[in-house]
Amino acid sequence: MKILVTGAKGFIGKNLIAELRNQNYTDIFEYCKETNHEQLDQYCREADFVFHLAGVNRPKDQSEFMDGNYGLTSTLLEALKKNQNTCPVMISSSIQAVLDNPYGISKKAGEDLLFEYSKETGAKVLVYRFPNVFGKWCKPNYNSAVATFCHNIARELPVTVNDPSVVVNLVYIDGVVEELIRALQGNENMVGDFCEVPVVHTITLGEIVDLLNSFKNSREERSIPDMSNSFTKKLYSTYLSYLPEDKFSYDLKMNVDHRGSFTEFIKTAERGQVSVNISKPGITKGNHWHHTKNEKFLVVSGEGVIRFRKIGSDEVIEYFVNGEKLEVVDIPTGYTHNIENLGDTDMVTIMWANEFFDPEKPDTYFLEV
């Protein structure tokens, strides 16, 4: 299948082409500003489907709206008619097409042109009125507030929100791409005369900024956002894509002594805490028990033994562990326990606890195994 994508270097175009290739679509004609008219004519002769994503969002002069959003559509459709190609054509329009502003008027003109083209030629046309689209590879300081917020907050630059209570409707780029590929396969989500991305997120600008600031702070707090919320999950992925390339990593506080170290990695109120414990050779750590707090130990390097003794019993239970055979050992409540490094090298253990350590209520009682 030969697919023409206009606006191939734009935000939606780059994401769409990347996923088309992931799904083994190999004949993709990429049209952008540098493409000449002869190439466009060839593409329009051979294409089996057209994604018309090119357009003008932020021109230097408002007259460029009509040139970019109406004029280019006209050129595309004329080339298809010249080559007698009635393949399906999808166009990216905007919810602003119903508004009386230069951008909206130009988008509405492009829609009308496509509908007339369909009546004239019988070609299938798909008009998508997108709300605000967010996700990786969107240009900041252009036409996306989310992209600008992500870029600025990731760099500790100021963010300006005139009215935090303004409500916006957003669609995530992956959802857009999934819908466009469904359209390519003839399964578009048609609502009346137009097509829509099924999942739309409604949120205020103030809430978006608050979330993004919490993502930034999560590094210092060693926390993870609530991934059960689909919008938070998508926004967090978007935010990470705007990190400066020299800021991908961040330090953790290592609690170091002669026995080794203990470092908190991730803390979540809902799913507990993950830490990394390093024990020097011959060192035993632990010798305590809990009422309600419980843990999971996973030795990933080195070798050792985890010992248990039930409170009120003299019987000691031993689990030998090493990094060559990964196995998780649950630490049940009511058992005093310790972990000893039996090897000649550092032993590294990933530890999960079901709750944060609370110095006011540690639920940790010293008792030798």
Image (cartoon, rainbow, N blue to C red):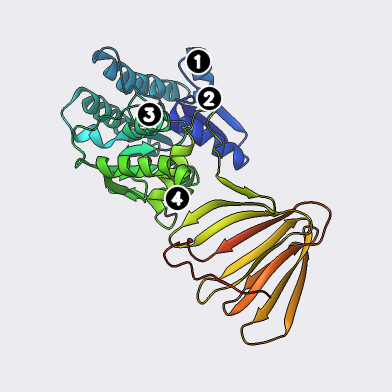
Write down the residue under mark 3.
152
Closest to the camera, between mark 2 and mark 4, is: 2
Q: Can residue 268 be spotted in the picture?
A: yes
The residue beneath circle 1 is 35
Residue 247 horizontal side relative to residue 106, left or right: right
Secondary structure under badge 2?
strand
The disc labelled 4 sits on which kind of residue?
Asn
- Asked where in the image residue 158 lies, by quadrant, the reply is top left
Q: Which quadrant does the C terminus fall into?
A: bottom right
The residue drawn where x is 45% and y is 54% is 227
Above or below 96: residue 208: below
N-term-proximal mark, 1 vs 3? 1
Q: Work out how far the residue at label 2 is from the one at label 4, CA to CA, in angstroms.
A: 23 Å
**Disc 4 residue crowd, few under 14, some 14–19, many 20+, Cα 10 Å:** few
Near mark 2 (Cα within 10 A), the count class, few <14, some 14-19 or many ≥20, is some
List x then y, in percent, for residue 248. 54, 34
> Outermost residue toward the right?
344
Mark 4–mark 3 distance (CA, rounded to whole Å) = 38 Å
